[in-house]
Every structure is written in structure tokens, then in C-alpha cells.
Image (cartoon, helix red, strand yellow):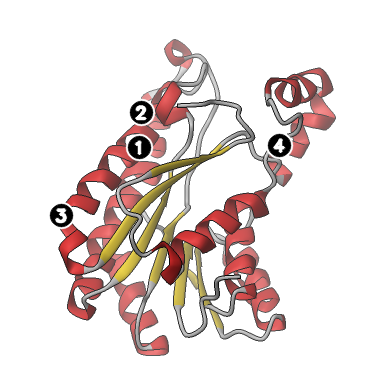
Amino acid sequence: MFMLTGKVAVVTGGGRGIGRSCCLVLAEQEADVVILDRDIETATAVKEEVEELGRKAKAYNVDVTDLAAVAEAVETIIKDFGKIDVWVNNAGWDKVQPFLKSEVKTWDRIININLRGTINCCHTVLTHMLERKGGTIINIGSDAGRAGSEGEAVYSATKGGVIAFTKTLALEFAKSNINVNCLCPGVTNTPLLQQLKTVDLPAYEALERATPMGRLTKPEEIAYTVAFLASDEACFITGQTISVNGGFTMM
């Protein structure tokens, strides 16, 4: 199996859900891991889990919507680890509701975290990767950005933006040995979704039935694909949008 020995990987929103799984799988493949999250307690807990796997890890309290804070974090990471090989833009947020019942403050938060946060991180880390003449960026999109999703109009717009942003960066930086790809999870069985199971079991079961493979995506299945895209074996893959969803959408 491919390994990430010697690589330094950064995961935004790494304190829980898909982000946590990414951190742990990257560590299992022998990468050192940096966890960025607004919740330093969960980030620190993941840091300890990574260290138990025998890898070096750090956790930083960072809001990806704050460009200056992201820039400061990158400087600190380079000081602590010497480099950044892999950057996973996982931090995201959503509020499911009919579009006409949504409010401007909700739009702003979704756009700032999902799209502006990704832009902030890429703009900052690409300068470092360009100097090193190499690196990998993996943006976490969503099938909502490819096919739309009822009750997630603005969220879908931001994830569609992430997909287009990914392709453009891939074009601009391909000759600099920098790979940029977008991974789109389907409906993923995170602890947050487990709450739906307790509140509305029929809705949860309907999501399972709608997935051709008969179950929801596991967070670690997203993480395995992230680890592959971070590996040297994926060096000729760039500008791609990859869905991991058990066939929930096909395009």
C-alpha cells in the first residue's frame, strides 16, 4: 500500500468528523499531521490520537475565514515542521433550510467558511509550495456542488465554487509540480448525521435506501481517498473532482 513517510500534512477542520478521519488515516500512512480547527479541544484530542500512532502532530486554533490567522499558522507550521507537503481544505459549515427562509447572516457564514476559507488557505500555502516546487492540495467539495441539494442552495453554490476553483488552480500550478484536486463526499455517516438517526429514523433510512450500495459513506472511506491523492502514486492526477458516495450520485 502507498505510504506518506516523510510528508507533513495539514487538515483544516481536523477536530471531528471527516477531518478527524483524514488526520488518523494520514498518520497511519506515516505522515506527520497538523490539525487546524476553531475548537482547540477537539483538535488537541485528535493530536493525541495521531501521536499514539507514532507520528509527530500539532494542533492550532485557527479560523480559516481570517486570512491573517491562516498566514500566521502557515509560518508557525513551517517553523515547527520545516515544510508543508499536503494541505487538506476540509473545514466547512452548512444550515439546511429552504432558500427563501434563509437569512443573509447564514449566507455570509456559509460562503466565508466554505469558499473564502478555502481561498484563504490556498492563497497562503501555495506561496510556500511554489518556493519548494511541489505540493498537494485536496479541497473537500460536495456532491451538492455537482448535482444540487434541496435545502442547501448557498452551500451547493459554495461547493460548486470550490470545484471550479480547484480546476483553475490545477491549471495554473501544474507546471510547478503542484497537484490540486477536489474530493466530493456523499452523505457521510458522521456523528452529526447519527443525530438524525435518533431524531428522524425514517429520514436516515431513506438516505441509506437512496444509496445504491445500501449504506452511507464512512468517514474513513473519504480519508482513504485523501491519503491516496496525497501520495506519490497519485502524482499525475490533478484538476479532478472525485466523488466517494457509494453511487448516490453518478456524473
Q: Which mark is residue 111?
A: 1
Q: Relative to residue 241, is residue 188 drawn left or right?
A: right
**Mark earlier in primary sequence (2, 1):** 1
Q: Earlier in the sequence, mark 4 or mark 2?
A: 2
At label 3, the amino acid type is Glu
Q: Amino acid at mark 1?
A: Ile
Q: Earlier in the sequence, mark 3 or mark 4?
A: 3
User: What label sits on residue 172 in the rendered view?
Assistant: 3
- Residues at circles 2 and 1 in contact by the CB criterion of under 8 Å: yes
Q: Residue at x 31, y 53 (%)?
A: 238
SS class, disc 4: helix
Q: Quadrant of the N terminus?
A: bottom right
Q: Residue at x 67, y 86 (%)?
A: 54
Q: Give the number of the disc on residue 193.
A: 4
Residue 208 visible? The answer is yes
**Residue position marked by numbered label 2 in the rendering:** 157
Q: Amino acid at mark 2?
A: Ala
Which comes sooner in the sequence, label 1 or label 4?
1
Q: CA distance from mark 2 to mark 1?
A: 9 Å
Whether pointer 3 and pointer 1 mark residues with C-beta atoms closer than 8 Å, the reply is no
Whole-angstrom CA distance, mark 3 to mark 1, is: 23 Å
Which corner quadrant holds the C terminus?
top left
Q: Closer to us: mark 2 or mark 3? A: 3
Q: Closest to the observer: 2 or 106?
A: 2
Farthest residue in the top direction?
A: 100
Tell which circle, 2 or 3, labels the residue nearer the N-terminal end.
2
Q: Left of 212 or right of it: where is 233?
A: left
Q: Where is residue 178 shown, x and y percent of the image?
A: 26, 65
